[in-house]
Image: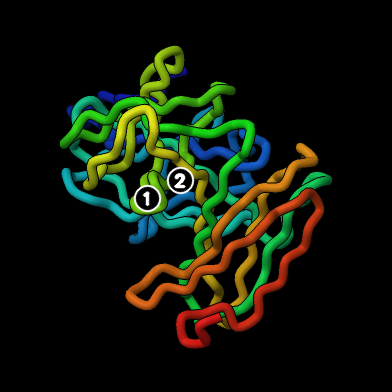
């Protein structure tokens, strides 16, 4: 499959600027055609390819805001840079919305907070811990210990409960080498710093939010749900299969 289409003819030349691979977070498979809309903030759309790839063409160098929406997914906005060489391929994950057909054992979390607020859940799998192996200081490349060779493309992660980043691409699965969306700012102990899974959603215009975590293992997941900010709100949660957790007035203003 050609991810980088270039068309010539009559003196006209087209070139790929960047490529998105859109993944269903629960199924860990490419999102099917028709289930997601992808466009730039100004309305320009990409060329859609097989396996969930979307190719943006003929963009001037710079930072672009990409909007992703789907009827069963959470809306998503990300920023990507055009003009880099080679053309970047970035994986993004679509999180389930309230109408997503969740599998048995899923944990459902809903509540209310300030409209538009970011609500972030961090959690760890007791039997599948992620740890920092090595990070190349000043660069966006990282090695992560993963006992189960977990698929991390497009996943948002948190290191030592301090710094959040997203895996854009797997560079070497055998050695667990990944490309991040940005370099780490802090310095962390190699082989010891714990890395948590993260899910971030935004409340709608009425302040309602929803998120879900897949858990059919029969074991509880320890997590923290919060709203980032100068006066951040946090609450420790224990997530079990099939649980429904309701958080009303969960906002910085309420201090819940």
Of pointers 2 and 1, the one earlier in the residue sequence: 2
Give the camera-side residue of 150 and 36: 150
> Is 158 located above or below residue 144 in the figure?
below
**Labelled disc at residue 164:** 1
Picture coordinates of residue 248 (x, y %)? 65, 80
Which image quadrant for residue 72? bottom right
Q: Residue at x 63, y 32 (%)?
A: 127
Residue at x 42%, y 57% (from the top left corner): 77
Q: Which mark is residue 156?
A: 2
For the question of whether residue 53 can be seen, the reply is: no
Q: Residue 194 appears at what percent x and percent y?
A: 44, 39
**Which quarter of the figure has residue 70?**
bottom right
Please tell me the numbered disc located at residue 176.
none
Q: Quadrant of residue 109?
A: bottom right
Whether residue 133 appears in this view of the structure is: yes
Locate the C terminus and report the quarter of the image it occupies.
bottom right
In the image, taking residue 238 as reference, residue 235 lies left or right, namely left
Could you say whether the residue bearing mark 1 is in a helix, strand or loop? strand
Residue lying at 33% horizontally and 55% vertically, measured from the top left:
65
The residue drawn where x is 23% and y is 50% is: 63
- Cβ–Cβ under 8 Å for marks 2 and 1: yes
Left or right: 28 in relation to 105: left
């Amino acid at each position: 499959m050609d991810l980088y289409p270039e068309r010539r003819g009559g003196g006209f030349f087209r070139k790929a600027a960047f490529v998105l691979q859109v993944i269903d977070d629960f199924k860990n498979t490419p999102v099917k055609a028709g289930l997601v809309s992808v466009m730039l903030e100004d309305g320009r759309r990409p060329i859609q390819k097989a396996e969930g790839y979307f190719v943006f063409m003929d963009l001037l160098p710079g930072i672009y805001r990409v909007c992703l929406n789907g009827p069963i997914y959470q809306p998503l906005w990300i920023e990507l840079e055009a003009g880099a060489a080679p053309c970047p391929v970035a994986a993004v994950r679509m999180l389930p919305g309230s109408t997503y057909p969740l599998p048995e054992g899923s944990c459902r979390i809903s509540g209310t907070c300030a409209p538009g607020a970011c609500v972030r859940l961090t959690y760890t799998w007791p039997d599948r811990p992620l740890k920092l192996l090595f990070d190349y200081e000043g660069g966006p490349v990282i090695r992560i210990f993963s006992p189960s060779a977990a698929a991390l493309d497009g996943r948002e992660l948190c290191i030592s409960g301090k710094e959040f980043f997203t895996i854009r691409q797997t560079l070497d699965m055998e050695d667990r080498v990944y490309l991040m969306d940005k370099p780490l700012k802090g310095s962390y102990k190699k082989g010891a710093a714990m890395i948590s899974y993260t899910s971030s959603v935004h409340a709608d215009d009425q302040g309602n939010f929803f998120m879900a975590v897949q858990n059919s293992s029969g074991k509880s997941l320890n997590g923290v749900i919060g709203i980032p900010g100068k006066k951040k709100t946090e609450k420790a949660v224990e997530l079990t299969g099939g649980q429904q957790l309701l958080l009303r007035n969960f906002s910085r203003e309420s201090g819940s």
